């Protein structure tokens, strides 16, 4: 709003010109989102405690988790809410990539919210049945990727790290490929969200990397210099990522060990979907596998564990996702969390370094 409202007075007062800049609006967005999330989070936790809307903890998990029962959840409401409120003030509504990514996030936020509502308020441990959850996720992702394909906002070329230029043109297969990235990211973040702060840390590092990559992708001269595809309007995703970083920092203030609030599926599914969609709309589908490497490892650990048990009737890990394996090895929860954060920071830095290694 500020961008569109203030911009018309820029002739009279040139200082308003600063609102044109993505970097300035990203910085303001980060500060605003952090503030909104910290204030909203404080009252949200009070409300959830008052209503006794707390997490049901499964008995078959690590015994150390049993004491977490009753911890308020659905923190995704104020995380995603802070991001949306911030974008109302600092966003540029003319960016098609921004609308497509936000549509994904809102759709997954509603799905996650319904799942949390059924589990927490209706005490139904199943929540939304997995088949219906996947159908909703793929339906949304295919629609968004079809929109990208039909409007030609992004090319169907495929780019991989360390290789200059595209490796192949996916053509119409860009649609299912992009949808797989978005749905995979959403579910991988959901699986990762199993320890205090474990998911929000890599979400913040991933949003930092993707925010930088969105800025260069949306800047014609810099994209040309770095041999990366130019995506018109992608720069606005930097403002979105800055708002996510701020909301993530505000949430982490309460979610850090011992957590006062969990993000719930409303948070994990929506934020994972937004990160995946941002990777698609900045042409970083493969690089995102590196940036979100912690999410990939968590998801792969589950696939390997389930596959091994089905084929060999033996487990590979003491328990999947892999963060539980380290817990059962005797690592205290904070040690598992911070070591996963360190890994995600290293992966994010490596991913940015690939910009120059082409
Ligand atoms: C998402 N949810 C957490 C919280 C959070 C197929 C199988 C791998 C599925 C997987 C599963 O159920 N995943 C669901 C993970 C849950 O967190 C809630 O869910 C939201 C995220 N969607 O926001 O509301 C628990 O995680 C803990 N937690 C924290 N701090 C946080 O900040 O401590 C969460 C956030 C919370 C809390 O205890 O209750 C979860 O773990 O369910 N299943 C599993 O992950 C289970 N693994 C398993 O069954 N492994 C098997 C096979 C299937 C691979 C095996 O290894 O053989 C583990 N999770 C649980 N119990 N709860 C282990 C058993």
Image (cartoon, rainbow, N blue to C red):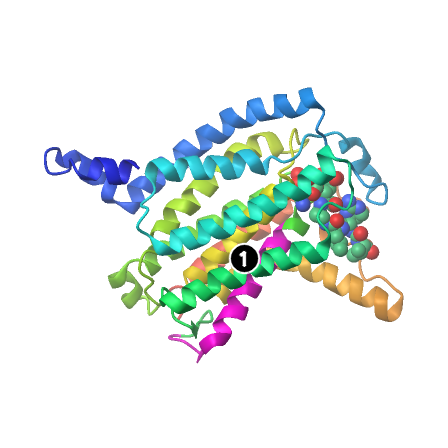
Decide if residue 132 is in sight here.
Answer: yes
Q: Is residue 303 magenta?
A: no
Which one is in front, 282 or 132? 132
Reading the image, the residue beneath label 1 is 140
Image vertical order of residue 340 relative to residue 230, above or below: above
Q: Is residue 177 magenta?
A: yes
* Residue at the image point whose x is 40% and y is 36% from the top: 86
Decide if residue 195 is in sight here.
Answer: no
Which one is in front, 3 or 113? 113
Q: Residue 35 in the image: x percent, y percent?
A: 44, 28
Image vertical order of residue 203 relative to residue 258, above or below: below
Task: Give residue 130's quadrant in the image.
Answer: bottom right
Q: Residue 357 in the image: x percent, y percent?
A: 40, 68
Which one is in front, 64 or 41? 41
Q: Residue 74 in the image: x percent, y percent?
A: 63, 36
Q: Residue furthest left?
A: 12
- Element type at mark 1: helix
Task: Give residue 253's quadrant in the image.
Answer: top right
Which one is in front, 82 or 314? 82
* Residue at the image point whose x is 62% and y is 25% from the top: 45
Residue stretch in magenta? 164-189
At label 1, counting other C-alpha atoms closer than 10 Å, the crowd grade (few under 14, some 14-19, many 20 or more) is many
- From the image, give the main secondary structure of the stretch colored magenta: helix
Please give left or right for residue 45 compared with residue 206 in the image.
Answer: right
Quadrant where the C terminus lies?
bottom left
* Residue at the image point whose x is 51% and y is 46% from the top: 106
Please give left or right for residue 45 compared with residue 12 in the image.
Answer: right
Please give left or right for residue 162 compared with residue 66 in the image.
Answer: left
Quadrant where the N terminus lies?
top left
Q: Residue furthest right?
A: 313
* Residue at the image point whose x is 65% and y is 49% from the top: 190
Q: Residue 230 in the image: x percent, y percent?
A: 32, 65
């Amino acid at each position: 709003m500020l961008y569109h409202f203030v911009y018309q007075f820029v002739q009279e007062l040139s200082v308003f010109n600063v609102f044109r800049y993505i970097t300035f609006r990203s910085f303001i967005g980060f500060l605003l989102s952090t503030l909104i999330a910290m204030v909203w989070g404080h009252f949200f936790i009070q409300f959830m405690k008052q209503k006794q809307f707390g997490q049901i903890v499964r008995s078959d998990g690590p015994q150390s988790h049993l004491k977490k029962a009753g911890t308020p959840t659905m923190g995704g409401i104020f995380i995603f809410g802070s991001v949306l409120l911030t974008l109302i003030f600092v966003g540029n509504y003319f960016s098609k990539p921004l609308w497509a990514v936000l549509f994904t996030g809102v759709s997954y936020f509603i799905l996650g919210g319904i799942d949390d509502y059924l589990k927490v308020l209706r005490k139904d441990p199943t929540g939304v049945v997995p088949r219906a959850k996947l159908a909703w996720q793929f339906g949304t992702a295919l629609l968004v990727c079809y929109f990208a394909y039909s409007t030609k906002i992004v090319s169907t070329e495929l780019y991989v790290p360390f290789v200059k230029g595209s490796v192949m043109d996916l053509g119409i297969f860009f649609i299912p490929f992009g949808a797989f990235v978005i749905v995979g990211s959403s579910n991988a973040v959901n699986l990762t969200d199993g320890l205090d702060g474990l998911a929000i840390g890599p979400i913040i590092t991933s949003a930092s990397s993707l925010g930088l990559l969105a800025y260069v992708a949306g800047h014609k001269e810099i994209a040309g210099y770095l041999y990366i595809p130019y995506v018109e309007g992608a720069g606005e995703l930097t403002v979105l990522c800055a708002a996510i970083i701020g909301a993530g920092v505000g949430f982490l203030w309460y979610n850090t060990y011992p957590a006062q609030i969990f993000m719930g599926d409303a948070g994990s599914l929506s934020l994972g979907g937004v990160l995946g969609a941002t990777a698609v709309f900045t042409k970083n589908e493969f690089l995102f596998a590196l940036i979100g490497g912690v999410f990939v490892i968590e998801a792969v650990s589950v696939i390997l564990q389930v596959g091994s048990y089905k084929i060999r009737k033996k487990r590979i890990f003491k328990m999947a996702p892999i963060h539980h394996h380290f817990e059962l090895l005797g690592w205290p929860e904070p040690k598992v969390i911070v070591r996963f954060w360190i890994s995600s920071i290293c992966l994010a830095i490596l991913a940015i370094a690939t910009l120059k290694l082409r």
